[in-house]
Amino acid sequence: MNENRKAPAPPRRKRRRRPGKFRRALHALSRAVLLLLLTAAAIVMMTIFFKVNTISVEGAEKYSVEEITNALDISKGDNLYLWNKMKVQEHLLEKLPYLDSVRIRRHLPDALVLTVTECHAAAAVKAEDGSYYYISSTGKILEQSTSDGGLAVVTGLEGAQMQTGEEIAPQTDAAVSAYLEIMQALGEQQMADDLQFINLQELTDVRIGCGGRFDLRIGAVDSDLSYRIRFAQTVMSERLSPSDIGRLYWDDEGRMHFVPETAEEVARSGSVSGAADAMNTIAQNPDGENGLTDSQKNNAQTSTNSSTTDSSDTTDSTDTSDSTDTSSDDTTYYDDSSYDDSSYDDSGDYSYDDSYDDSYDDSDYSDESDYSE
């Protein structure tokens, strides 16, 4: 009898009231205030408890600890954290040019430790006013001085921009790039300490003075630079005697020649240009054969003819008293023995074929009796 009765409607769910804009703003403000209070508390704690009390320096030789700490933008009593580490490091590198790198570490609760590496002056470049700029092997300008300081002098970089504390940009000058490549190659062969000069006045006739004894003429700075310096180092240390002084160069066939000269002539090569050198008839390799001018070839031929007819003359030509006077007999020095690149083992063995020592090409050697074994 209750079939026609309608079922009761389900109860309505109560809609949860969302917080209004005011309450949301209040919550956000509360969070901001809490964060601000925490930050302020942290700053107060750092200010009170983390102050610099000790500054130590490791790795310094050129500069004293006092010089470095005085140049630092941080002093005792400053906060240990409230400064930019990168900016402090950059400022220190600019103020003390001999510093190559700086690492700053914080040691709680109150110490700073600076670990530095220093640059070393590798060469000097003469400025227009007669002063000298000392530069590192990587091209950083370290200081300006009134003298070269006994450093190897580099000619050909006079046009480069020099600013103490900065590096010469390689892209500004081809000579700068050549200098950097040469210094890297010399460093690989541990020859940088023996460097006497680098002549970059003509980039197709680059010259390197080594140990006050050798004028190494490497030609142009190209992909063969490392090989040529490595090969020259082997010849100088293993094939030449400690008393030998002179010029090393390559001919057009890739052979190395040694030409005895005086120490004064070797030093002179570091200051004159290739053009000036040619005017004085001692060009590096004018015809790709023996490094002789026409007049020197004529003299060489005359001396060779006389030596074949009079054995006593050949004996006199080996007199060691003439070994330092190139003006007495050009043929004794300009047609010295050649080193064949094929005898050089590029794998690092640096071995030479001894049979080559006794088999000189007569067409390339003017007075074989002078150097017979």
Image (spheres, grey):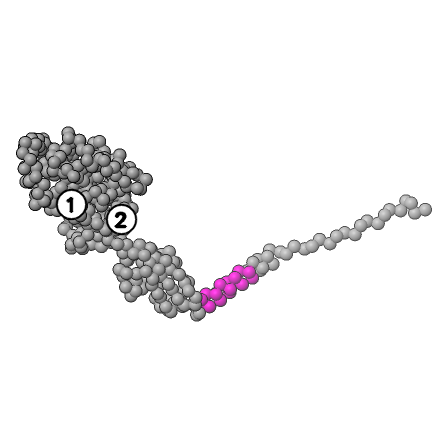
Reply yes or no: does residue 37 show up in magenta.
yes
**Marks 1 and 2, the one that precedes in the sequence:** 2
* Residue 255 coordinates in the image, percent (x, y): 21, 34
- Is residue 372 visible in the rendered structure shown here? yes
Check the picture and name the quadrant holding the C terminus.
Answer: top left
Q: Residue 244's mark? A: 1
* Residue 132 coordinates in the image, percent (x, y): 18, 52
State the residue at coordinates (43%, 70%): 48
* Residue 92 coordinates in the image, percent (x, y): 31, 58
Q: Is the residue under label 2 in contact with that under label 1 (CB below 8 Å)?
A: no
* 2 in relation to 41, above or below: above
- Is residue 282 visible in the rendered structure shown here? no
Q: Secondary structure at mark 1?
A: loop
Q: Residue 190's mark? A: 2
- Side (left or right) of 230 relative to 323: right
State the residue at coordinates (86%, 46%): 6
User: Foreground: 77 or 225?
Assistant: 225
Q: Secondary structure at mark 2?
A: loop
Range of residues picked out in magenta? 30-47
State which mark lies toward you, 1 or 2. Answer: 1
Disc 1/disc 2 C-alpha distance (Å): 20 Å
- Side (left or right) of 305 relative to 82: left
State the residue at coordinates (8%, 43%): 319
